[in-house]
Amino acid sequence: MNDNRREFIRKTGLGVLAGLGAASGIFSKSSFATGEAQTTHGASSSGKRWGMVIDTRKCREGCTKCIDACHEVHNVPDFDNAKDEIKWIWKSPYENVFPGESKQFVSEETREKSYLALCNHCDNPPCVRACPTKATFKRSWDGIIAMDYHRCIGCRFCMAACPYGSRSFNWRDPREAIEKRDQAYPTRERGVVEKCNFCSERLAQNLKPACVETCPEGALTFGDLNDPESEVRMLLEKNHTLQRKSELGTRPSVFYII
Amino acid sequence: MRRVMKIRERILIFCGLALFLFVVSYAFLQEGKAKKIPTPVAKSPSEQCVESREYMRANHMLLLNDWRHGAVREGERIHVTPDGRKFEKNLSTCFQCHGSRGFCVRCHTYASAKPNCFSCHHEM
Amino acid sequence: MIEKALKGNRSYWAWIVILLVIISAGVYSYINQLTTGLTLTGMSRDVSWGVYIAQFTFLVGVAASAVMVVLPYYLHDYKAFGKIVIIGEFLAVAATIMCVLFILADLGRPDRVLNVMLYPTPNSMLFWDATVLNGYLLLNVVSGWTVLGAERKGVPPPKWVKPVIYLSIPWAFSIHTVTAFLYAGLPGRHLWLTAVLAPRFLASAFAAGPAILILVSMILKKTTGFDAGKQAINKLSVIATYAAILNFFLLGMEFFTAFYSNIPSHMHGLQYLFFGLHGEGQLVPWMWFSISVGFASLLVLLIPRLRTSSPWLIAACIGIVVSIWIDKGVGLIIGGFVPSPLEEIVGYTPNLNEILITFGIWSIGILILTVLLKVAVAVKTQDD
């Protein structure tokens, strides 16, 4: 190539770069401009911190009303195969929900019972730390670990990061497996991660989470952990509670009265 | 020193050019799905939208993006219009007057815009 | 310079066609996956990363290993690497592109991949991984192509290439360290939660990478007559040997910490992989195969008479690559998910779609490497 052509290409290239640079400065509506500050460490100093206390003594064996209510209200699909399974809340044996606890001479009741598992909405969430796009983030005003389904790229890094296995991925179109669509809440698409959202849409209407409201035994109590007068705080004062894998420092917002 | 192009080279170049022209103009060769520019009408035309018609025509996608960001990421679920009316930042707010997804589809089909709102959100 | 890749003999074009056929099969499978979803893979809720991320992890190491030729040649003026450096750099380019493609293939929403750049998240290791990987690709493409271009014209390379090459040296270490950080910082995955993961990644990379480089050079010699030089090959095999020793040493360290401390959560991952856990041991044969092939290859590499003999060296290199590919890909990635955070054992088997896409992406990488090396060899032997 002769020198004149090389000069031309070089100048054009630099010109295009300069133009792009100027354009991004002038048309600052690009998302570079949106400042996103999401805390991943430390408790939210002001505002609520939603939490839940599960009284496992009251939880009836074989009852799945909370699970059914949650999955119905949120259009969680039921694929009937373990590979594509999506679940926001479920029951598992003691040694699975609390694998760090002693397995020696466990009482008969503890051995036979199933325990509720759901997203712990941690105060120090490793999933939020892992997410490369802040598609999952801690809401600064109430501590709920939320999913922005519009932003999720489906990398599933949050699923690897969660120490509790709380998250599910849409391996296929969920609408194929939703029996009855609840019109008040969207479905999700294939390719994004989803999990329990502490019923933030119901909280916005001053309703309790679906699982809490449906439980016929009143085993689930929900409230503001930052409010010392709240029912959840009273329960925590009066009862010794367990948390899942508390040694990991995730500071879960879900407590279990065993 | 210029040399004469072989026949094979000419054919190759011609075919390449033809393919290129086809690929580049493919989008423009599509026949428009609607011949007439559609005029969407509200279910109850006496009601006023959250913003003016001119604004919405040009910027409804920006408004929806804004609503999405506000409701999902900031917890600001209420939109206040310039004249003080309050609305929920929700697609269902739009459907209160505009009925259903059909309202959106008419213009989007004409404009060949394919936002995928309804793969998650409900159609009315 | 790229026009040099368009002139080749019959076997060259046959090779290109074979690769294109495999690539088309991969593309077809990927379109399937795009339309139906990742349910067309063997991944599940509990094993949410599979063969794609396994390939990515292995290939980042191969990409980083270019530093094993770049550092001695450019930083320490080790002239014997003069001919092999460009092969190493182009291998890094092909490997890095494969890494990016494997990540894209694994994403649930690849159409949103730019969100990683539009919403930069410095606390996320994936953000940094995307950044450093693309940066490394740029560094190697620019430096490799420029130096080659200069050689073609018979002039010294421009001055600005030197700092770019120097930058690529720590950058190479960083890409594989950041990849290790993806795993090593996750509190719930005890197989990965070890300080030794990044050193082990680097050690295995610097064993498998040079081994691949040796094999590629030998293939080049066979097909094009381009000889990287006996001294370069010998030195590379020594580097691979020491790196392999370090890799097995670190693996031994993992075993000691897990089994001497006897802490169940520390042991479970290795138990599942090497001995089976709760009656499940899908991967046990793989791991022991990896260990035995790895040790056997290392033994061969340790004996100078064998290491310098081509047939033994080829066997040992293949062995090291296979061993580390299983160890990193199958063992580490799949094993990290088992047992699940609820101590459940869920198996994983890639299915046909997944395997075809994997082969397709490998073929894309090999195609890119073929084309780049064709250009490099043509320039270096200057047969215009």
Image (tube, coloured by chain):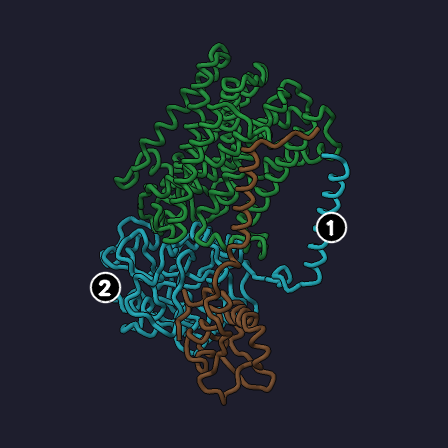
Chain colours: A cyan, B brown, C green
Q: Nearer the viewer, residue C175 or A94?
A: C175
Give the left or right position of residue C311, taking residue A39 as reference. left
Quadrant in the rendering for residue A215: bottom left
Question: What residue sits 29% from the left and 58% below the top?
Answer: A79
> What residue would you read off at disc 2?
A61
Indicate the position of residue B87 as horizontal and vertical percent values. 51, 81
Q: Which residue is mark 1?
A: A15
Query: Picture coordinates of residue A86 (x, y %)?
Result: 34, 58
Q: Residue at x 46, y 23 (%)?
A: C11
Instruction: Give how far across and how far down residue B11 sits, in percent.
Output: 54, 37
Frontmost residue, A224 versus C64: C64
Sequence-wise first label, 2 or 1: 1
Please check whether the numbered discs 2 and 1 fall on a single chain.
Answer: yes
Instruction: State whether residue A111 is above or below residue A228.
Output: above
Residue C198 vertical placement versus A215 (above, below): above
Q: Dot 1: within a 10 Å radius of its alpha carbon, few (fewer than 14), some, or many (20 or more) residues?
A: few
Q: Quadrant of residue C115?
A: bottom right
Residue A56 in view, yes or no: yes
Local crowd at mark 2 within 10 Å, few (<14), some, or many (≥20)? few
- Chain ID of residue with mark 2: A
Q: Quadrant of the N terminus of chain C?
A: top right
